[in-house]
Amino acid sequence: MANSKRQLFIKRRLRVRNKLRRTNAGRMRLSVHRSSKNISAQLIDDVAGKTVASASTLEKDLGVVGKNNVEAATKVGTAIAERAKKAGVKEAYFDRGGFLFHGKVKALADAAREGGLKI
């Protein structure tokens, strides 16, 4: 029986996350979620189980409310890098989830790198 798109996405997300956890133990995780209307990023401390910083296109101060394009993803990446610096985080590993590293997800990662976050 064929798997649904959702089941394939969940399998891909777990495969990516588990591989990253094995190779990057002890580092913060920069997790990305992309929907049809918005994109968001969270800096998560898995040891403590807490979110250290977050940024999303739902925030009015970024000026891209309700947009989900490469420009919005770049602004979110820059914002998460600034907030990570304020929190004292210099490096993290990039958890793309089940999303392909292309387009908006890649733009967010590149903007975070340019903002000073070592990914």
Image (spheres, rainbow, N blue to C red):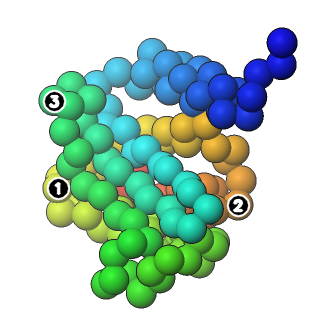
Q: Residue at x 27, y 29 (%)?
A: 46
**Labelled pair 3, 1 in contact (Cβ < 8 Å):** no
Q: Residue at x 51, y 66 (%)?
A: 38
Which residue carries the number 2 mark? 103
Q: Secondary structure at mark 2?
A: loop
Q: Is residue 87 above or below residue 3?
A: below
Which residue carries the number 1 mark? 87
- Other-residue count near label 1 (Cα within 10 Å), few / some / many at <14 / 14–19 / ≥20: few
Q: Residue at x 63, y 73 (%)?
A: 69
Is residue 78 something one can see in this rendering? Answer: no
Q: Secondary structure at mark 1?
A: helix
Which is more N-terminal, label 1 or label 2? 1
Q: Residue at x 48, y 49 (%)?
A: 32
Q: Position of residue 99 (x, y in %)?
A: 64, 43
Q: Position of residue 89 (x, y in %)?
A: 24, 49
Q: Is 33 displayed left or right of 100 in the figure?
A: left
